[in-house]
Amino acid sequence: MTDTVANAIATPDHEQPYAALGLKADEYASIREILGRRPTSGELAMYSVMWSEHCSYKSSKIYLRQFGQKVSPKMREKLMVGIGENAGVVDIGEGWAVTFKVESHNHPSFIEPFQGAATGVGGIVRDIISMGARPVAVMDQLRFGRIDHPDTARVVHGVVSGISFYGNCLGLPNIGGETYFDACYQDNPLVNALAVGVLRHEDLHLANARGVGNRVVLFGARTGGDGIGGASILASDTFAEGGPTKRPAVQVGDPFAEKVLIECCLELFAGDLVEGIQDLGAAGISCATSELASNGDGGMFIELDKVLLRDPTLTAEEILMSESQERMMAIVQPEKLEAFLAVTAKWDVETSVLGEVTDTGRLVIHWHGEEIVDVEPRTVAIDGPVYERPVAYPAWLDALQADSASALPRSNDVDVLRTQFLQLLGSPNLAAKSWITDQYDRYVGGNTALSLPDDGGMVRVDESSGLGFALAADANGRYAQLDPYQGARLALAEAYRNVAVTGAVPAAVSDCLNFGSPENPEVMWQFSRAVEGLSDGCLELEIPVTGGNVSFYNQTGDVPIHPTPVVAVLGVIDDVARRVPSGWQDEGNNIYLLGTTSEEFDGSAWAGTIHGHLGGLPPAVDLAQEKRLAALLAAGAGQSLIASAHDLSDGGLAHALAESVLRFGVGARVWLGDILHRDGVDVATALFSESTGRVIVSVPREDDVKFQGLCEGRGYPVLRIGVTDKLSPALEIQDVFTIGIDELRGTHSATLPDHFS
Amino acid sequence: MPTIIVDVMPKAELLDPAGKAVAGALDRLGDSTFSAVRIGKRFELTVDGEADDAAVAAARELAESLLSNSVIEDVVSVRVAGE
């Protein structure tokens, strides 16, 4: 029997399964208080999914406010749409704008790696479409368990094929990303998906339902029983072992349907047929109706039985909660409805008119003529519960931080250095990721200017002017475990630097904050510190956070993952023809090291790979210096003085040199003497330390004087440390070792195929 | 030699994109006899010996563990061919 509003009033004591839907007793009580009665089963379904951690940000909200508070006027200048919409939008000039966002699809990707990762791509792409933009690229930040664990290959194969399947079918280049392996992600891999789109300023669309009488239209795939409760149950709870079996709340994606949906939406936008639009992701129709109504005139009337179903036996509650993929909801003026339906018919996209915008301030939903929902939409979508969860300084942190890597044995014997260098080069986290990225289409569309293995991806936006953007996303969970505040700033600094080395000017940030359970006070402390670090850092660099995502409950049993704040930085470049590649191509270019090196091994790849060690304090990060470095690189790229630039991060100078050789197969002679002398460090430190603010650049001889003048003028420390050598196929580090390119390549590229092919 | 047939179908509540594509094609061809199509998999396992209860049980075990993905698919039948 249908649980109508009248029925709910008549049967106030009817027991409801709120706990099974993931609601706490006090949350259920406050729903009753808001409504002044018990909720109907439909209302309960809506509140339960919308008040879930995944949709409501109830544990993170009080911290995320900092991103909106710590802003300078300069940060607002280019920001067309900020946090709160489906994705942030940044003005990149010439009438163009870019929208980008990164989101997690961690939990579904452990249960069903292929479909979980595929629908992660699909979901973030729909966020981009709903801003009025054409999606132009994707990238993914992946974390898996130990590379040699028996379950890792299952997850890696599924996730990588899921991403390549969905992205390749859509015809979107995958321009970057990162992959790490660590035991802490064994039963909880991280699959973060980023998408980016471009639009003309006038094409901007927002998710709001304005204009009384405007029609509410659902279009795209039919609604089925997939993914019911995905957000409320799967993404908002831990995988408790031995607990009750969770229903498999996965969805199956159809990229070809999504491709049609993209083109259909763009034609609708071009014809000015849409007033407001929202994609259907987590919490499906519950989310789309309540958010559109809250952001608009506040009222909406929906006839739920008009929803086109794949499975006619679905109940009203299931329809409200379904997370079927490839669906969109639009607000359409009645006089434009016919033209709207003509476009969706042309693209063979099934469409149904569900209702209209009202001025009642209520979201009212009928099911076969009976009223099953009557709520104030804000109470569902915006004014959900907000928790100030207990925070506690981790009991183990002082001991961890006291256990510095400086106590580890560090040899300067040349044979040992050679062995350690190769060990690092072939280690799972530093090894070539081409086994993964070769499965992705990187150049489809013909606008990719840079992609992996370059430090950042770059895409041309305007064919005539060459205007483009660069993107990089980074996180180092090991650093963040040692100090979440610095860890977040280090992730920001690295992504910022990775954009700067391409020649682009960093302009905006999106983030995906992956943490353990918010109900664990130590995790909540880590989260609060990371958000504080990231928001402080963005203010210091003066680039705004445009939006992002929080993923909690990433843990199995009692062990949380390392805090993993993935930070994506977007930069703008006036002409992609002036991009700077990451590797050497020419003979006889001088190699310069920008920045200084100190003894910073805590949390480093060297400590982890060679000694299995994690302890101490992560490298110091000076964002004012990073800003000067980025400005220097932009100036150098703008004057075409720089032939290549490569950021120094995991694995330090040694690894950056190896990657610069391997990018195009050009060798080099390098000397460390000047570094040792100036910075007062030993050879091992010069090679493997992970001090920040460092980049190696190669400069053609004829530009040498100008380049040195540029560095001097800007007061940035610089040393000439070598020269490229096209004739000798080797990396020679004088007085330390010489390793042929074949051996470098063999070591670097064998690791992933050895485990997964 | 006897053969055991295993049928695997996508779970009823999940989307079957391939089936949907065929249904769409039927529609475009003007055929209105069928309203829905779902596509599954059929495995034919040849038994080296007799297709007895033990062999069927082994096939069922294989169907659940290797031939199907229990998260998104159901094993709908395991039977000896011709029976």
Image (tube, coloured by chain):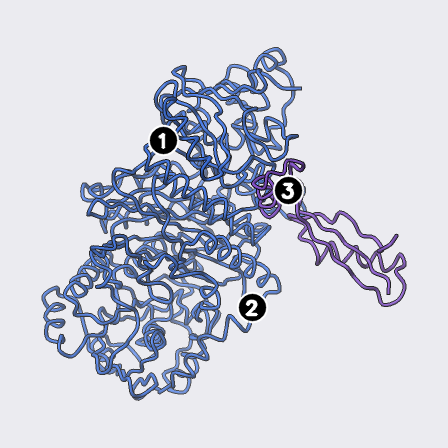
Chain colours: A blue, B purple
Q: Give the label on residue A596, or none.
A: none
| Residue neighbourhood size for the residue with mark 1, other residues' Cα within 10 Å, grouped as few (<14), some (14–19), many (≥20) | many
Badge 2 crowding class, 10 Å Cα cut-off, few under 14, some 14 to 19, many 20 or more, is some
Dividing the picture into quadrants, the one containing residue A432 is bottom left
Q: Amino acid at mark 1?
A: Val
Contact? badges 3 and 1 (CB < 8 Å): no
Do circles 3 and 1 both sit on a common chain?
yes
- The three-letter code of the residue at mark 3 reads Lys
The spot of residue A534 in percent (x, y) is 32, 49
> Dot 3, crowdedness within 10 Å: few (<14), some or many (≥20)?
few
Query: Do discs 2 and 1 share a chain?
Result: yes
Numbered disc 3: what chain? A
Q: Chain of mark 1?
A: A
- Contact (Cβ within 8 Å) of mark 2 with mark 3: no
For this rendering, which residue is in front, A138 or A170?
A170
Q: Which residue is disc 3 drawn over? A: A246
Disc 2 from disc 1: Cα separation: 46 Å
Q: In which chain is the residue bearing label 2?
A: A
- Residue A631 visible in the snapshot: yes
Earlier-in-chain disc, 2 versus 3: 3
Q: Quadrant of the C terminus of chain A?
A: bottom right
Which residue, given by chain and number where applicable, does mark 2 sit on? Answer: A756
